Image (spheres, grey):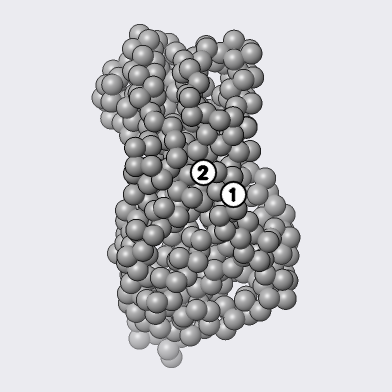
Amino acid sequence: MIRCISPIDGTVYAERPALSAAAASDAVALAKQAQIGWTARPQSERIALVQAGVAAVGAMNDQIVPELARQMGRPVRYGGEFGGFNERASYMAEIAQDALADIVIEDSPAFRRVIKRVPHGVVLVVAPWNYPYMTAINTVAPALIAGNAVILKHASQTPLVGERMAEAFHDAGIPEDVFQNVFLDHQTTSDLIAAKSFGFVNFTGSVGGGQAIERAAAGTFTGVGLELGGKDPGYVCDDADVDAAADTLIDGAMFNSGQCCCGIERIYVAEQHFDAFVEKAVSIVKGYKLGNPLDPETTIGPMAHRRFADEVRAQTAEAIADGAIPHIDKFAEDDGGAYLTPQILTNVTHDMRVMRDESFGPVVGIMPVKDDAEAIRLMNDSHFGLTASVWTRDVARAEAIADQIETGTVFMNRADYLDPGLCWTGCKDTGRGGGLSLIGYHNLTRPKSYHLKKA
């Protein structure tokens, strides 16, 4: 049984039976058969149907927003994810024709030589709970547009998301077997991958989960895209707008209760601005209202599950025991469970887990640095590499620093945003592959060469 425990009150909010191994195999067989007809449709028709499905999700937003609050704790005041969901799908629809266009090498009286992009067949999307609509659409939209069938397995914390997407897409006219939402346990998922059921697997989640996907795919030559953990840094240079940096970086650290793939988890500040930055950061966090996410006055809700909050508490307590200084007194609403006080720590070092391990919660450590070289060294002192945020008034300086940071994306004077025109990718333990942009289409298709002699 796939079960969602609501972080609001610890009760079971939704539960669904997992498919048996036989039923899961049948779902794959139906997808493979349906994909043949789907890829034969004109690309323009596939694009229009995906866009209609996206719009149908938007029409459900009034129902979706409170469902998200109940499933994973994000406050209703933020209005859900449809803005980003629509932006990403719309961009991928817009670039599809060019991204999937044939590459004609020669078309002469003697030869036609061309490279085409062809779909993998069936794509498995294993989506996470923290931004359950936006992370899923990153792959679902371009995979369908490119002619693949898609099987979506959503996280157990957000089981209603896949159902909503399937309802919307099917109502829009996408065949039920072409886009399927399924409930699977871990073993059945691994067994399907090991049986070469899919042409491509996209997984967003933990490092351990990504390792399990890779082990299941070993020897099958199945393409795998993995976006795993992060410990994203921010660096405030000596010429930065300190107030603007604090506003954005602290929001990047605390929004969604810190449960963002590219959330800011460690901040390095030019030493002359350190005190001012910390003062501003503390003031921001002290103004948050922790509470029930269904309350429109709540600005920070519970973490999605008590065990996630327990890990953040453990990292924070260990750091304080080793000399870190906490700046936020315990909020009255902190119940020792999923409701957790957001915290800012100074006097931290990289010997502390809170500055090394992924926290994925509302805690951030802040350190002073003497120059760019020290900041670069500390930013690179991590097993992860998803994004980094550099704050300076000098574009050339930002790019020079960016060239030296081991990460997938570098921001200047912003953070915690996924630009669908750029490749979403990472390095080190953050995983491999790339989503969205032109490169996203390349990963969801394979090149096929045609060498046709005319005479």
Q: Is residue 165 above or below residue 9?
A: below
Question: Image quarter for residue 88?
Answer: bottom left
Between residues 389 and 10, which one lies in front from this camera angle? Answer: 10
Q: Give the residue displayed 37% in from the left and 76% down from the top.
A: 172
Residue 383, percent from left and from top: 60, 33
Q: Amino acid at mark 1?
A: Thr
Residue 8, percent from left and from top: 51, 43
Q: Give the residue displayed 40% in from the left and 77% down from the top.
A: 171
Q: Is residue 300 above or below residue 423?
A: above
Residue 223 visible in this rendered orientation of the protein: no
Residue 181's disc number:
none
Tell whether label 1 touches label 2 (CB within 8 Å): yes
Residue 11's disc number:
1
Residue 390, percent from left and from top: 37, 28
Between residues 124 and 436, which one lies in front from this camera angle? Answer: 124
Between residues 239 and 159, which one lies in front from this camera angle? Answer: 159
Q: Which image quarter is the N terminus in?
A: bottom right
Residue 371, percent from left and from top: 41, 14
Question: Image quarter for residue 312?
Answer: top right
Q: Amino acid at mark 2?
A: Ile
Q: Which residue is mark 2?
A: 8
Dot 2: element: loop
| Crowd tier of the residue under label 1, counting other residues whose Cα lies within 10 Å: few below 14, some 14–19, many 20 or above | few
Position of residue 18 in the picture relative to residue 41 (left or right): right
Question: Image quarter for residue 113?
Answer: bottom left
Residue 325 visible in this rendered orientation of the protein: yes
Q: Give the residue displayed 56% in from the left and 55% down from the top.
A: 13
Q: Give the residue displayed 48% in from the left and 29% down from the top.
A: 333
